[in-house]
Amino acid sequence: MYKQGPIGVFDSGYGGLTVMKELVKKLPQYDYIYLGDNARAPYGTRSFDTVYHYTLECVQHLFDMGCRLVVLACNTASAKALRSIQQNDLPRIDPDRRVLGVIRPTAEIVGNYSKSRKVGVMGTAGTIASESYPIEIEKFFPDITVHQQACPMWVPLVENNEWNDAGADYFIRKYIGQLLSRSPDIDTIVLGCTHYPLLLNKIKRFVPEGMTILSQGTIVAESLADYLQRHPEIEAVCSKNSTRTFYTTDAPEGFDKQASVFFDAPVTSKHLSL
Ligand code: DGL
């Protein structure tokens, strides 16, 4: 039996905290280590190769800190790095460790919400260009048509604490308008970026009434609970002392203030040098 370790949660910056908040709510008994690569965020505009290398480096750090299971709480990393890490790197590093993403759990349930079978996906330019959502959703719900919209300004608005200002409205309205112009029948929108839940209240104001908007935190938490139930060998190596530890690759002072908004609770982080 392997030594037990915390569940690692990774994101390019703050966004993954919206997922970790729900993981902690749903599965409070486990230990968690969060790592935000704030020094190199955003990832959404970077190439496949860069996102892959950055993500792999961070996953390796989480493994070095004892994690046997890591959740990529970032759509861009899930879209551009997860498959290579699972298929090429894990067998070499340690075939008994696991890395999971956020796109598949979302794709698995989206068809349960849409009546019109027209779904909109909003994400970073990288996630949208990867076509990961249409590919994954097709596997579970081949009758659904996916319309995608890149929202390159949304992560900067959130990362720079500007999402509540009037200036944010322009870009929120703009991308929603562009998405809905592709098909007026879209009845379900996936917020395919872990930063976007912070924009949820504003997004709701600019979509037609009755639109279902899916944020990923609770979806990923449900999916992880189910995964751990189906994989008792992985569950057994997750330590259970309810600790939460936070690392950022940038300065902790700046991180903590912003992070507590995403996590909805005080955060005290440590610096991780890459
Ligand atoms: N949080 C990331 C995601 O879910 C994107 C942020 C970034 O561009 O770094 O896609």
Image: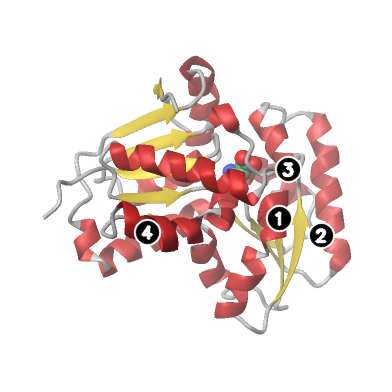
Residue for point 69% across, 49% down: 124
For label 4, count other residues whose C-alpha is less than 10 Å away and answer few (under 14), some (14-19) or many (20+). Answer: many
Q: Report, in whole angstroms, how far the alpha carbon at label 3 lies from the one at label 2.
A: 16 Å
Q: Based on the displayed image, in which of its 4 quarters is residue 156 positioned? A: top right
| Position above or below: 180 against 54 | below
Give the secondary structure at mark 2: helix
Residue marked by disc 1 = 122
User: Mark 2 CB in 8 Å range of ligand 1?
Assistant: no
Cβ–Cβ below 8 Å for labels 1 and 4? no
Give the secondary structure at mark 1: strand
Residue for point 20% across, 44% down: 240
Cβ–Cβ below 8 Å for labels 3 and 2? no
Cβ–Cβ below 8 Å for labels 1 and 2? yes
Residue marked by disc 3 = 202
Residue for point 79% across, 44% down: 172
Give the secondary structure at mark 3: helix
Q: Nearer the viewer, residue 135 or 177?
A: 135
Residue marked by disc 2 = 179
Q: Nearer the viewer, mark 4 or mark 3?
A: 4
- Disc 2 residue type? Leu
Residue marked by disc 4 = 224
Q: Report, in whole angstroms, how far the alpha carbon at label 4 lies from the one at label 3.
A: 28 Å
Of mark 1 and mark 4, the one earlier in the sequence is 1
Q: Nearer the viewer, mark 3 or mark 2?
A: 2
Where in the figure is residue 210, as x and y percent of width and height? 72, 64
For label 1, count other residues whose C-alpha is less than 10 Å away and answer few (under 14), some (14-19) or many (20+). Answer: many
